[in-house]
Amino acid sequence: MKNKWFIRIKMITVFTVVSLFCYAQTPTDLLPGDPGALSVFTIQNLSFGAFSHGITGGTISIAADGNRSSTGDVIALNLGIQYYNAIFEIESPAGTIISILNGPDATLTGSNGGSMSLHIGSPNPASPFNNTVGPPGRTQITVGGTLTVGGAATAPPGSYTGTIYITFNQQ
């Protein structure tokens, strides 16, 4: 009888000690970061500022360098609403080759109905490029785009929003 209790207590002790060191998986906050990983940070979103358009519409563009232009009967206005290119910063090891792939054209929807089509422009620096700045430094990438504006019936005045997709690949 005494041996049975001794064996039971010994087994319980062994299982308790073993269970303290068994994990289903290692917690991710204990793992070191990937030193070769590419990180992308959005610094500034793309904005076309204020503009007006007539019956036929046209385009308004923001270049990667931040310059704005328009075509058709779209008129760029300077009403204090800023226009600017998109700015991203990447962090990756020096010597990494970075390729940037734009997603499909995006549809922007208006706060008062209507829609416009946004085509993402080429990045600066041009893709692909060799990243020369190592962490913790970051390389700045600017991107512009062209907004196709329809007539007043299909694109009424208002605030337009949408989502663009840009893929950053490292080699």
Image: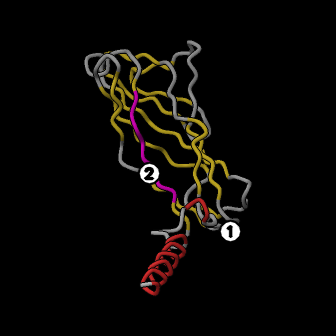
Relative to 83, residue 55 above or below: above
Q: Position of residue 63 (x, y in %)?
A: 55, 38
168 or 145: which is nearer to us?
168
Q: Residue 9: give its label.
A: none
Residue at image x 35%, y 31%? 108
Residue at image x 46%, y 87%? 3
- Is residue 92 magenta-colored? no
Query: Total marks drawn?
Result: 2
Which amino acid is tagged 2?
Asn
69 or 155: which is nearer to us?
155
Residue under numbered circle 2 = 102
Q: Position of residue 76 (x, y in %)?
A: 50, 20
Q: Compute the Cα span from label 1 to label 2.
A: 22 Å
Q: Position of residue 34 (x, y in %)?
A: 61, 66
Q: Residue 95: give its label.
A: 1
- Mark closest to the chain's N terminus, 1 or 2: 1
Secondary structure beneath label 1: loop
Relative to 36, residue 14 above or below: below
Residue at image x 39%, y 50%? 103
Q: Are marks 1 and 2 in contact (CB under 8 Å)?
A: no
Q: Position of residue 62 (x, y in %)?
A: 53, 34
Which amino acid is tagged 1?
Gly
Identity of the residue furthest to the left in this view: 153
Task: Specify whether 92 is left or right of 155.
Answer: right
- Is residue 167 magenta-colored? yes
> How many residues crowd mark 1 within 10 Å: few (<14), some (14–19), many (20+)?
few
Task: Determine which quarter of the picture holds residue 127.
Answer: bottom right
Identity of the residue furthest to the bottom in this view: 3
Secondary structure beneath label 2: strand
Magenta residues span 161-168
Task: Determine which quarter of the picture holds residue 105.
Answer: top left
24 or 100: which is nearer to us?
24
